[in-house]
Image (cartoon, rainbow, N blue to C red):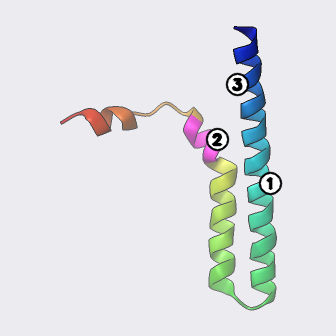
Amino acid sequence: MSNIMRDIQIMAQTKDENLGYMSDMALELAQMAEDSGLATLAYLFRMAALEASTVDTVMAEPDDFSHQMTSH
């Protein structure tokens, strides 16, 4: 059982690191697009960075989405 908990912890840490990397990369791409005069593309990269940085917060909050999907 402790191996499973350790694996879950490692997977969560890896996911956090990957999301942080994606957010940082999206911000760098946004800056490059802005420097090239591509404001719309820069905006999209900034939104991607925001999404990557907030995905854990959204997923951690309990919601009724699964109930909405199954209720008729």
Q: Which residue is mark 2?
A: 56
Residue 41 placement: quadrant: bottom right
Horizontally, residue 40 falls left or right of residue 20, namely: left
Q: Quadrant for the C terminus, please.
A: top left
Q: CA distance from mark 2 to mark 1?
A: 14 Å
Question: Tag 2's secondary structure?
Answer: helix
**Which class describes the residues within 10 Å of circle 3: few (<14), some (14-19), or many (20+)?**
few
Where disc 1 sits, the SS reads helix
Q: Nearer the viewer, residue 51 or 17?
A: 17
Residue receiving disc 1? 21
The kind of residue tagged 2 is Asp
Give the main secondary structure, helix, strand or loop, of the magenta stretch. Answer: helix
Q: Quadrant of the N terminus?
A: top right
Badge 2 density bin: few <14, some 14–19, many ≥20, Cα 10 Å: some
Across and down, in percent, residue 7 comes to 74, 23
Q: Residue at x 44, y 34 (%)?
A: 63
Q: Nearer the viewer, residue 13 or 53?
A: 13
**Which badge, 1 or 3, comes first in the chain's sequence?**
3
Report the magenta residues as a range. 55-59
- Disc on res. 8: 3
Q: CA distance from mark 2 to mark 3?
A: 15 Å
